[in-house]
Amino acid sequence: MARKQEISHAKPAMNIWSGVLFGIGLMALIDEIIFHQLLQWHHFYDLFTPFIGILSDGLLNAFALFALVAGLFMFADIQRRHIAHMRTWTASLFLGLGGFQVFDGIVNHKLLQIHQVRYGVEILPYDLAWNISGLMLLIIGTVLFTQARKHMKPSEAR
């Protein structure tokens, strides 16, 4: 009886936030591990000393891990309550991945200019690759989200 009440009150918001948080955390970790640590192309904040740059990378890592774990806990909760909608969750994952990347490329790289993808080279190809791949992830997420909404029962779409 309690399970039926939970299912009847299933809201896509939990699925969406879980997927988006997991996607943001995952892309932030991919960025941090590949571009900040392995390639050492930049730090999250490059406008001060290397100490501050490394400190800012640590803060980004902490944020990424928090978002990833929060998304996983929310996912475990919706699975436990049998209200997980995998199509919506997957769409939201892609929206989180692309959202982080486009936000980083537009806001951090261009508006705030706290770091660039790479220094000492022609930056345009790197910016285009970063932002276009982020936009592609957002488009994939949007298409998947539209398809997921079509497959939801009317009671799930509220």
Image: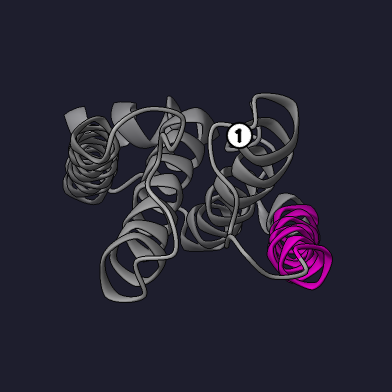
Residue 115: horizontal and vertical position, in percent?
A: 54, 41
State how the image is colored. one colour
Residue, disc 1 = 108
Vertical side of 120 occupied by 61: above or below = above
Which of the two residues, 129 or 150, is positioned nearer the viewer here? 129
Residue 48: horizontal and vertical position, in percent?
A: 37, 27
Whether residue 30 is visible to the viewer of this picture, yes or no, is yes
Which of the two residues, 69 or 143, is positioned nearer the viewer here? 69
In the image, what residue occupies the spot 78% across and 58% down?
A: 135
Magenta residues (range): 123-147
Label 1 neighbourhood size at 10 Å, few (<14), some (14-19), many (20+)? some
* Element type where label 1 sits in the image: helix
Determine if the magenta segment contains residue 132.
yes
Q: Is residue 7 left or right of residue 71?
A: right
Quarter holding the N terminus is top left
**Kind of residue indicated by mark 1:** Asn
Quarter holding the C terminus is top right
In the image, what residue occupies the spot 28% across and 43% down?
A: 64
In the image, what residue occupies the spot 37% across and 47% down?
A: 43
Whether residue 1 is visible to the viewer of this picture, yes or no, is no
In the image, what residue occupies the spot 67% across and 46% down?
A: 105
Determine if the magenta segment contains residue 49.
no
Residue 125: horizontal and vertical position, in percent?
A: 80, 72
Which of the two residues, 52 or 107, is positioned nearer the viewer here? 52
Indicate the quadrant where residue 156 lies.
Answer: top right
Residue 86: horizontal and vertical position, in percent?
A: 46, 61
Report the predominant secondary structure element of the magenta stretch.
Answer: helix
